[in-house]
Image (spheres, coloured by chain):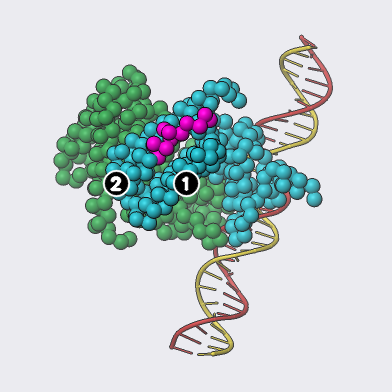
Chain colours: A green, B cyan, C red, D yellow
Amino acid sequence: MGDNNLLTAGMSMTEEQQAMPLRDAVFMSLRKAILTGKIKPGERLTEVKLGKILGTSRTPIREAIRLLEQENLVTIIPGSGARVSRMTVSDLQDVMEVRSALEQLSAGLACERITEEEKAELYEAYNAFVRSTQSEDSIMIADSDVHFHNLILKAAKNQKLGKILDGLADNIYRYRYEFIREDGHYEDLIREHKELYEAVISGNREVAEKSARSHIARQWSYIREHLQEDAGE
Amino acid sequence: MGDNNLLTAGMSMTEEQQAMPLRDAVFMSLRKAILTGKIKPGERLTEVKLGKILGTSRTPIREAIRLLEQENLVTIIPGSGARVSRMTVSDLQDVMEVRSALEQLSAGLACERITEEEKAELYEAYNAFVRSTQSEDSIMIADSDVHFHNLILKAAKNQKLGKILDGLADNIYRYRYEFIREDGHYEDLIREHKELYEAVISGNREVAEKSARSHIARQWSYIREHLQEDAGE
DNA sequence: TAATTTGATATAGTATGCAGTTATAGAAAG
DNA sequence: CTTTCTATAACTGCATACTATATCAAATTA
């Protein structure tokens, strides 16, 4: 079969698709392909084609595409097909404004709800972050940053908030490494994390929220800077 | 046909289903049925049954149910079917916390982005709200309150924010009339609206956010009060 | 030549069939 | 009378078949 080349070259079902509904496996597979840029913005998602690539019928593909639309990763034009969403700067601005508000909420709630156990975890994550900045590997830095914030989100103990923030994160996934300064001056980042960490540990809601806000603001300014360079696409 | 009795008695396709994909019509229809309590929490949604009632095949029903799941109106158990979600107090608390943060954002952004035209609209809406409180009809009061807040949301000019807040509103739809005091003392509500209106008009972001916050807090305390009475369901 | 119509093709929308799984009711055993 | 097992009915998951619609290109007309 000629399908396997595309399958191995591009997307594939995730390893552990046992006992998982096909639609979910397809969803995760497509989501990953979009987030990693394997399927590019503006590209069309045709049901039969994807079905051939992933080895399923149209039905699970359809359902997966509907879910992707909910996360704003694809845009469906009724009657015509689905395309990978093309985010405008204005769209991104919308997302970042909401993220800012919700990351503040996350930090604020965490202040009041974090357990001793979680404090220990957060301490670990904070140190891991500081270590990663020394490596100057922006992938590692970004990942440890995300981990740190996810722990705070977990400590906030608000499932709805978690779901929404996860969805928003997808929207800026492509830019996740770009808010790391290339020149290796991470003082601001470290300071913010330190501030945030200490505020959450000590329950200082006001400071925690302020740190979260400036953290997002910094991210956004870096992303926006990068968008200037692209200037089109 | 025996289907029409159920159709007219319970749910039905919305009037303007012309040129709209069936799945969307079904989605809106089911959504309405759930929000208005025509289908009750815990009740099972079977594809063939709904298909018979609404006069479609299973496919559009399936897709509509998937969308409803995204809005947390139904819960899908893989392999077994879909049921109307049963919200716990904790779930509601999560929703209200997020709503509070986002209504604040909405009010804050509106301060900076409202146009003269929108100011006039908002003025109208504010007056309509005050008038409605004199009527002591809690349905009318709640509706004019929602309208007032929707105008602010529109003035905030953030589509993402609008979408998310709409989704959250569905989660508390059942309780939308319950935050209106029964005893006819609406001073607090009117004062909050006046404060919020004037803050948005004059661009006083801090006051606007504070008003929005206390408005949601009031809503939540009334809803929670009411939940005590039910004490079970 | 430009615009408009028309027809062919591709693709989404919808319906239905089949297989496997889950829920249910009834019988048998305790 | 209760519990457990089993047979059956009902339902979802996935696939496929059919239908409606959109898109694009060629042809026809102004």
The chain holding disc 2 is B
Q: Residue at x 42, y 42 (%)?
A: A167
Q: Nearer the viewer, residue B123 or A147?
A: B123
Badge 1 crowding class, 10 Å Cα cut-off, few under 14, some 14 to 19, many 20 or more, is: some
Q: Nearer the viewer, residue A39 or A2?
A: A39
Quadrant hosting residue B209: top left
Residue wearing tag 2: B203
Badge 2 crowding class, 10 Å Cα cut-off, few under 14, some 14 to 19, many 20 or more, is: some
Q: In what element is the residue under mark 1? A: helix
B75 vs B218, left or right, is right
Q: In the image, is residue B187 part of the stretch drawn in magenta?
A: yes
Q: In what element is the residue under mark 2? A: loop
Q: Nearer the viewer, residue B22 or B36?
A: B36
Residue B60: x and y in percent read 62, 50
Q: Nearer the viewer, residue B71 or D5?
A: B71
Q: In the image, is residue B197 part of the stretch drawn in magenta?
A: no
Residue D9: x and y in percent read 78, 35
B147 vs B116, left or right, is right
Q: Residue at x 65, y 51 (%)?
A: B13
Residue B203: x and y in percent read 29, 46
First to last magenta residue range = B182-193
The chain holding disc 1 is B
Residue B182: x and y in percent read 53, 30
Q: Residue at x 23, y 28 (%)?
A: A127
Q: Is residue A77 above or below residue A135?
A: below
Q: Is residue A50 above or below residue B35?
A: below
Give residue B128's mark. Answer: 1
D9 vs A50, left or right, is right
Residue type of the residue flagged with mark 2: Gly
Outermost residue toward the front in this view: B134
Q: Is residue B123 above or below residue B190?
A: below
